[in-house]
Each structure stands twice: as structure tokens, then as C-alpha cells.
Amino acid sequence: MNDNDTKSVMDVKNRLNVDAHETTVWRWIRKLGFTYKMTLPIPVRRNDEDVKEERVSYIGWYNSIPFTIRYKNLIFVDESPFHLHMMRSHSWSRRGISPNPITRSSRGPNATMILAITSINIVYCEAIYTIVTGLVYQEFLKKI
């Protein structure tokens, strides 16, 4: 079993192909030094230095725009993924080791809301049930 794998006691029992009660398997897992912890997927590049620098650059640009223009004339377009596929919220891991699986991105494959908003209201929104690509964004921008 992989280190970044979320498994239930039943999964471990089936994987090892043992004829034992789940409670017995649970005790074996505990004796091997595993604990049951909450998991949280972490995107690979979430806190890289270049990503942090981009955030700081954006904040500088945003704050340089006059207040009246910033709140009335700027429209923000962003996506918000809904992870419709389920991932266990808890998993077993050795004491002192994080159970959080590393994911390729924070986007969910199932449903995404794209919104165009100002600081006052929603200008336009759309639910997308496919992968959001540059072409999908272009089509969305044409509708605004």
C-alpha cells in the first residue's frame, strides 16, 4: 500500500487477504504504529516561491487602482470547483507522518461554477460539467 493512500480497515483486510475480524485488523494496524487521522489533499505547487510572488504582485496591482474604480468597474472571473467525487476524510498513517495525499491540482473533475462578479453583485455565472479549459473560459467571457 502506498504512503499517500487512504484505506479503511476493510480495505487493508481485503488487500492482505486475511481471515480475521475487522477489530483484529484494526489492532494490528495500531500495533504497527499507525494512527487514524483526518486527511486533506494538498496541491503540489500551492506554496512554491513563484506562486507566492505572483500573489504579492497581484495584491500590489489591485491596491494601486483607485478605490472608486476598483469597486464599481472591476469584474472578477474565477472558477470554484465542486469535488463531487468523494475522498475519505480520515486515513491511517504512522505516528508523526501526515496522512494528507498530494494531488496534481485542487480542481475537481465533476462540476465547476464560473462566476463573473463585482464587489457589489454577480454579473454572470455558469455551471460547467466538463474540464474547464482556456476555450471554456473564452466562451464564458463572450457571454458576459
Image (spheres, helix red, strand yellow):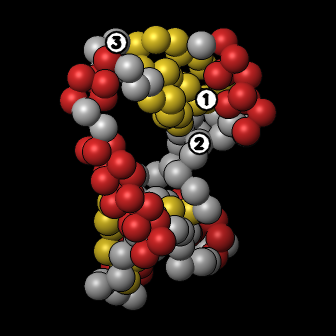
Q: First in sequence: mark 1 or mark 3?
A: 1
Image quarter hosting the N terminus: bottom right
Crowd band around label 3 with a 10 angstrom C-alpha radius: few (<14), some (14–19), many (20+): few
Residue 105 location, x and y as percent?
58, 56
Can residue 10 be seen at all in this image of the molecule?
yes
Instruction: Report if the CB atoms under discs 1 and 2 are less than 8 Å apart.
Output: yes
- Is 48 in front, or is 80? 48
Label 1 to label 2: alpha-carbon separation: 7 Å
Q: Secondary structure at mark 1?
A: strand
Image position, residue 7 (x, y; %): 52, 63
Compared with 56, 30 (above or below) is below
Q: Is residue 136 above or below residue 55?
A: above
Q: Which residue shows up at 59% across the image and 13% down it?
A: 144
- The residue depicted at 39 percent of the width and 66 percent of the height is 52
Look at label 1 and name its amino acid: Ala
Distance from Cα at disc 3 to Cα at disc 2? 26 Å
* Drawn side of residue 132 relative to residue 76, left or right: right
Amino acid on which disc 2 is placed:
Gly
Q: Which residue has dot 3 on it?
A: 121
Residue under pointer 2: 108
Residue at 48% over, 71% down: 50
From this viewpoint, is residue 25 visible?
A: no
In the foreground, 110 or 73:
73
Asked which secondary structure carries label 2, the reply is loop
Closer to us: 39 or 7: 39
SS for dot 3: loop
> In the image, is residue 111 above or below residue 51?
above
Query: Marks 1 and 3: which is nearer the front?
Result: 3
Three-letter code, disc 3: Asn
In the image, farthest residue toward the right: 135
Return the residue at label 1: 111
